[in-house]
Amino acid sequence: MNVIGKTLSRAIAAGAFLLAVAPIATLPAAANSQQLTPFRCFTQDDNDHVVFGPASFFSPPTLQGPTSFKENSGPTVVTYPLHHGSSQGRRVDYVITDASNLSVAEKLGVNYVPKLAQALGTAAVQNSTSAIGTGNGIEFPASVDFSPQHIITPNPVTGFPPTAAQPGAMGETGYSPLVLVNFRGTDVVLNAPQIANGTGQADKVISIDLAHQVVNYKETDGCYDNESVHYASFDASDFGAAAIEDVTYAPALGAAPSLGCADAAVVAANCSRESLIAFINGQTGTTNPQRQGLNAALLDGHSPLNILKEIPEPTAQFDYSPLWDIHLVRWNASVPMANRLRQTDFATAQTLVGSQAQSLTPSGLSNTFGATGFIVNCPVVSLDVNPSH
């Protein structure tokens, strides 16, 4: 299927001829002395590497865990416990990354994310009759077709948007990684993305070790508060985004409330999302420490180094969610490429919209910061904390 997702297509087409002309100012770069590197936000030197976990909202950033998952020394690979369930009589394999209930998160050794409960009652949550925690797996109403061939053809000049896009995994009608189950007597929303079944496996699965009942999964690098964060990408509610991320297309996930809900000064009570900034036209080059953006990722195959607004730590005040409300941001044509410095802090990057950049929204390019209209499911795994920061 040689198309871009509808949401991306509308935003790009509506803004294609709207190039804001703004005065060129000195643009902010990273706010500390860490060294930039092409494929990570910063080098690993002089950092404390911490893995998130059920107590992350209550523990200092330098003291996280314990968790049921672990990383290699990269970190570029995360290892999750492998779970087995079914969907309409078919075996499915899945991982569990987050839980909306603290006691369940502690028992499972996963991230505690109360925001997931805000998606209950929407199509973003599969309702299962499963009672798990006693050796039984989840019975999912819908599963995933992992058989399609992944296609992503970058624009040879600009990289983004791609000239052809096809996700390598397609969720069945009603599929979502979020599922309501009963865990040892407690109703809880789990983030339980399916990663394999009889049709194949997710493209980012590196290996499945049945002897040890674990799966090794490719991570993505990003930026948070001028530090390096590492996360795993599983699903996207937009067709084109799923192809770019090489994850499962899960349109039902887009029903999670609600567009732009985490942007307000006071986050909406029913907000299940958190905000993420992805530039679309930053600097490129495999040896360039300023490279950043979907264009760079499409041209060289490495992380776009997106910028997260929150992670699970005490200062987040329970704002974190793995359901990232994507905010595509486009540098203005008036900003020379050499001035498009890598952005590593959400608030700083946000201030560029309206002066040096614009947001791609469902109605087109805007000088007001806004969400683009789709979600990606990317649970965070770890953070490189700089003690001097």
Image (spheres, rainbow, N blue to C red):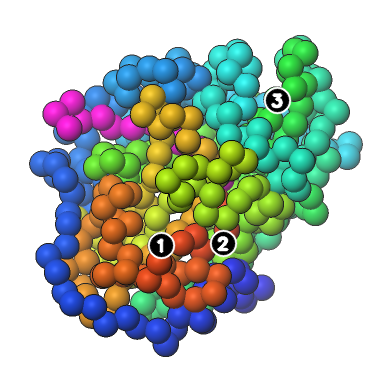
* Disc nearest the viewer among 1 and 3: 1
User: Which residue is situated farthest in the bottom direction here?
Assistant: 17
Q: Residue 373, labelled with which disc?
A: 2
Give the quarter of the figure containing the C terminus.
top left
Q: Position of residue 328 (x, y in %)?
A: 43, 63
Q: Say if the magenta span includes residue 238.
A: no
Q: Secondary structure at mark 1?
A: loop
Q: Residue 84, labelled with which disc?
A: none
Mark 1 vs 3, N-terminal side: 3
Q: Position of residue 243 (x, y in %)?
A: 56, 62
What residue is pinned by disc 1? 369
Tell me the distance, in whole angstroms, between the alpha carbons under discs 1 and 3.
33 Å
Structural crowding at the residue carrying mark 3, measured as other residues with C-alpha within 10 Å and reported as few (<14), some (14–19) or many (≥20): many
Structural crowding at the residue carrying mark 2, measured as other residues with C-alpha within 10 Å and reported as few (<14), some (14–19) or many (≥20): many
Q: Position of residue 137 (x, y in %)?
A: 76, 24
User: Which residue is situated farthest in the right direction here?
Assistant: 89
Residue range highlighted in magenta = 377-389
* Disc nearest the viewer among 1 and 2: 1
Q: Residue at x 68, y 30 (%)?
A: 189
